[in-house]
Amino acid sequence: MNWLLQIFIWIPFVGFVLSLLINGKNEKRLSLLAIGTVGLQLFLGFGYVIYWVLCNHPNVNLKDIVIYRNQDYEFLIDFYFDKITATYMLVGAALSFMVILFSRYYLHREEGYKRFFNTILFFYTGYNITIFSGNFETLFIGWEILGISSFLLIAFYRNRFLPVKNAMKVFSVYRLGDIGLILTMWMSHHLWHENISFMKLNNYELVHEHLNAHSYVGIFISIMILIAAAAKSAQLPFSSWLPRAMEGPTPSSAIFYGSLSVHIGVFLLLRTFPFWENQTIVRGIIILLGLSTMFIATGIARVQSSVKSQIAYASIGQIGIIFIEVALGFEKLALFHFAGNAFLRTYQLLVSPSVVSYLIREQFYNYTPHKKSFEARFPKKLQNTLYILCIKEWNLDTILYNVIWNPLKKAGRRLTIFTPKTIYFIFFPSYLLGLLGMYHKDMIPTIILSYLPIFFAFTGLAMVLQSFAEKKSIIHTWLLIVMSHFWIAMAIGYNDIFDLSQIYLYLSGIFVSGVGGYYILRRMQQLEPDSNLSIFHGHVYEYPIKAFLFLLACLGLTGFPITPTFIGEDLLFSHMHQHQILLATFISLCFVIDGLSIIRVFARVFYGSHVKTYHEVAYRSS
């Protein structure tokens, strides 16, 4: 029974690979492949669930592939199946099947027809890896695939300004969720001293024993899980990204942000519930977060002029209620609520254009004033205050910018020390000197040695911050990102005694991706000398192959699954001690901001309205 779990990962993955090989002009073959892939998954899924129920629905765990192992660490792919997975699998397969059927005709003769179906199947692969994951590492693989496929689908109309800009906004919030999962995995290694599986989390005695001995560590892990879940499910203060994500085609909005992807935060809470169920303070925070999101999102939804935004905020409010249900321990109710909300929002988004047309006609011929609403009972001043706040969406976007992104950009603008001259004549020799010292640590005083990891990590973070704010040289930005990874690797090299082959594994992915990306950017500068990071250039129109290859280099550099960089990042965190919060914060921020810098370079060079005026381009407001 266990080995059957592999089938549900291989079916969408094979479908995605085959879709890449089909000619983009053959719409019928592309759509039939997608329909057949998801239809087969749905059929086999129903069959497997019936068989699983007849076998008394046991919790099934499959330790599938050990990708990397040494004496202290094991990176393995683990799959797990229980009633949570069963619900998410059937709902996901049914909705994906319906949306793909709808998309077959909805996107007929669309320029990006092939690209849409490629990305949908890529998303569906990531979704299944996530819901079948049996440990945090496997879940993070699917989590990252969902993130990059979200970016690609929101920016589907890549020759327009707003879709690309909003895709960047959504990706930035997803990176905040990534930091929560990264720190969860880091501290979990120290709590359990192993790659803990979700099957073991169901062992009450084991969890209770570890949390009694390390209560603060348990609270830290639970808060990081909550941050990741809130970012992915658009709960406060991250709610503003969901309506921005509606810039993509209606079918992708329905399957991603109405039904499946937006409920992955709920899945994470359900999956880790046995870990934090006895932490009263964490349950209280989740309930408070869900209540706040429910009231604020409902108010915002009631004043939206766009039907997609109304549906998005209504969905956010319902997910807030599901968060409360999970925190109260009502698992079955939460799963039922998830399925109902997913089907309802998918239906609403798919029919929304027709409903809008109908309502406009009704307003002309059969207009009747609305009855007094619940808010009419409030004092007039309170009504007006709430109305203005909801119209402005409680300034959630502005708060995120002022609290997180603007300070990072300001810090990056002030860091002007990493010029080409200082890199060649100061930082490169300093790095070589640091490498020499790493092999002769006994010659360095103990006091200095204890501070060196933080210093090197801060240097890497400073490089990434400057790359995040750089607007002129694309090559300089790329080199700063690559160099930051080398400084991070040195910080870990000084932090712990371990086999240096692990650092070489991590840097091998960085080196290959960095060199490949550098070559493409250098070639682009030869072809388009005026390229910089101050505007979107839209060069994908003329150089689609280079855009695709550079995207692969970007994914490799960000640690996309399952590259050496991805495994190396997890390895590096396993060599940070649990009391080194400052070091972990610096390195986590480095990974988050470097992902944003990399996608920013890709979007500015290849996406947006084409800079050459003799090409047909979309209006900025379209």
Image: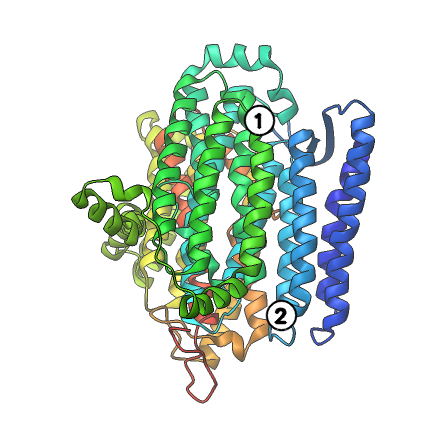
Mark 2 Cα shell of 10 Å, populated few (<14), some (14-19), many (≥20): some
Q: CA distance from mark 2 to mark 1?
A: 38 Å
Residue farthest to the left, as pictured: 381
Q: How many marks?
A: 2
- Residue at x-position 60% and y-position 44%: 142
How far across and how far down the image is residue 173, in percent? Answer: 41, 48
Indicate the secondary structure of the residue bearing disc 2: loop
- Residue at x-position 44% and y-position 44%: 316
- Residue at x-position 55% and y-position 27%: 272
Work out whether residue 511 can be spotted: no
Query: 549 above or below 264?
Result: below
Kindly identify the amino acid type of the residue bearing the numbered disc 1.
Answer: Glu
522 on left or right of 464: right
Residue carrying label 2: 107
Residue carrying label 1: 331
Kindly identify the amino acid type of the residue bearing the numbered disc 2.
Answer: Leu
Indicate the secondary structure of the residue bearing disc 1: helix
558 on left or right of 106: left
Query: 29 above or below 599?
Result: below
How far across and how far down the image is residue 360, in percent? Answer: 44, 68
